[in-house]
Image (cartoon, grey):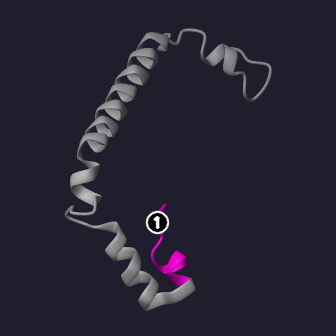
Amino acid sequence: MRTRGLWKIDLLMAGAPDYSLVAWFFLRLLAAVYLAAFWSLAVQITALAGTQGIYPLAEQMRIAAEDHGFWRFLTYPSIF
């Protein structure tokens, strides 16, 4: 194979197969996995982090405020 430059990618990739169908399928499968994960979270979040859940957030945030004061946002990161 004769090339005129060091990095002639067009000549190197001339016989490479097209993976667009595989990429399309992979992205749809990944989206389905994310959908299943977030759907599961949406169904279970109140039992896990609700007021009477396994990990009550209000109580945890109160404890963090008592222990760390203003710095609780750095030592106990949360979106709540």
Dot 1 alpha-carbon crowd within 10 angstroms: few under 14, some 14 to 19, many 20 or more = few
Query: To which quarter of the image does residue 6 belong?
Result: top right
Q: Is residue 6 visible?
A: yes
Compared with residue 17, is residue 46 higher up or lower down, i.e. above or below?
Answer: below
Q: Residue furthest right?
A: 4
Residue ID at (21%, 63%): 52
Left or right: where does residue 74 sit relative to residue 61? right
Task: Say which of 44 and 27 sits in front.
Answer: 44
Q: Indicate yes or no whether the magenta region holds residue 59.
A: no
Looking at the image, the residue that sits furthest to the front is: 51
Tell me which segment is drawn in magenta. Answer: 71-80
Please name whichever residue, 24 or 3, is drawn nearer the observer in this view of the structure: 24
At horizontal 31% and vertical 41% (from top left) the residue drawn is: 42
Q: Is residue 20 above or below residue 75?
A: above
How many numbered callouts?
Answer: 1
What residue is rendered at 23% in x and 57% in y?
A: 48
Residue sitting at 72 percent across and 21 percent down? Answer: 8
Q: Is residue 15 left or right of residue 76?
A: right
- Residue 60 found in image quarter: bottom left
Question: Between 74 and 47, which is closer to the camera in this rendering?
Answer: 47
* Residue sitting nearer the eye, 64 or 27: 64
Type of the residue with mark 1: Ser
- Return the x and y of residue 73 as percentages of the image width and height: 53, 75
Q: Residue 21: image x %, image y %? A: 44, 10
Instruction: Answer yes or no: is residue 1 visible.
Output: no
Examine the rendered structure and indicate whether residue 45 appears above or below residue 8: below
Is 74 in the magenta? yes
Q: Which residue is mark 1?
A: 78
Residue 32: % across, % down: 34, 26
